């Protein structure tokens, strides 16, 4: 059990198509995003203040990060934006807290165009291929600091 004397504020941001988790290929997840969100909140209850955001629009994700720039951590699953969004990379460079980049599937064992993440250039940690369990590992990482 973790004991913390200060409030830990965490943004969990998900990019394109996470809202279709259960409907997408099984390499992602067998549970819905709604159920995953409930599990994460239950797991981190009374330990971490989590603010979720999900969008299929790159600019909306950037606006959300800028509005919440004072949070301590970002757990971000940028989806396809991982591979080409310089705008998202520039935005997270401004963030002063730690950034955990998360991929439900193993991007290094996928199509050639998914193997490179430019978001990793400014990520403190990358979690890839652990399916929905990656979110819980990200939370454990935060709590271990």
Image (tube, rainbow, N blue to C red):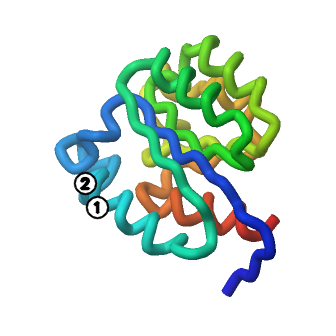
Residue 99, percent across and down? 70, 42
Query: Which quadrant holds the N terminus?
Result: bottom right
> Are circles 2 and 1 on residues that touch, CB within 8 Å?
yes
Relative horizontal placement of residue 98, taking residue 25 as reference (left or right):
right
Instruction: Classify mark 1: helix, strand or loop.
Output: helix
Relative horizontal placement of residue 115, taking residue 111 as reference (left or right):
right
Residue 77, percent across and down? 51, 39
Identify the residue under disc 2. Answer: 32
Q: CA distance from mark 2 to mark 1?
A: 5 Å
Query: Which quadrant holds the C terminus?
Result: bottom right
Quadrant of the image occupied by residue 74: top right
Identify the residue under disc 1. Answer: 35
Residue 24, percent across and down? 22, 41
Residue 113, percent across and down? 48, 20
Instruction: Classify mark 2: helix, strand or loop.
Output: loop
Q: At x 77% / y 70%, what residue is drawn? A: 144
Q: At x 57% / y 75%, what residue is drawn? A: 46
């Amino acid at each position: 059990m973790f004991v913390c004397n200060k409030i830990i504020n965490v943004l969990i941001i998900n990019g394109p198509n996470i809202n279709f988790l259960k409907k997408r290929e099984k390499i992602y997840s067998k549970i819905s995003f709604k159920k995953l969100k409930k599990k994460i909140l239950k797991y981190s209850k009374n330990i971490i203040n989590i603010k979720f955001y999900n969008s299929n629009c790159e600019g909306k994700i950037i606006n959300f990060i800028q509005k919440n720039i004072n949070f301590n951590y970002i757990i971000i699953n940028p989806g396809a934006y991982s591979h080409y969004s310089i705008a998202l990379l520039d935005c997270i460079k401004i963030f002063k807290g730690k950034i955990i980049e998360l991929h439900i599937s193993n991007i290094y064992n996928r199509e050639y165009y998914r193997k490179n993440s430019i978001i990793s250039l400014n990520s403190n940690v990358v979690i890839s291929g652990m399916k929905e369990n990656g979110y819980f590992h990200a939370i454990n990482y935060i709590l271990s600091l």
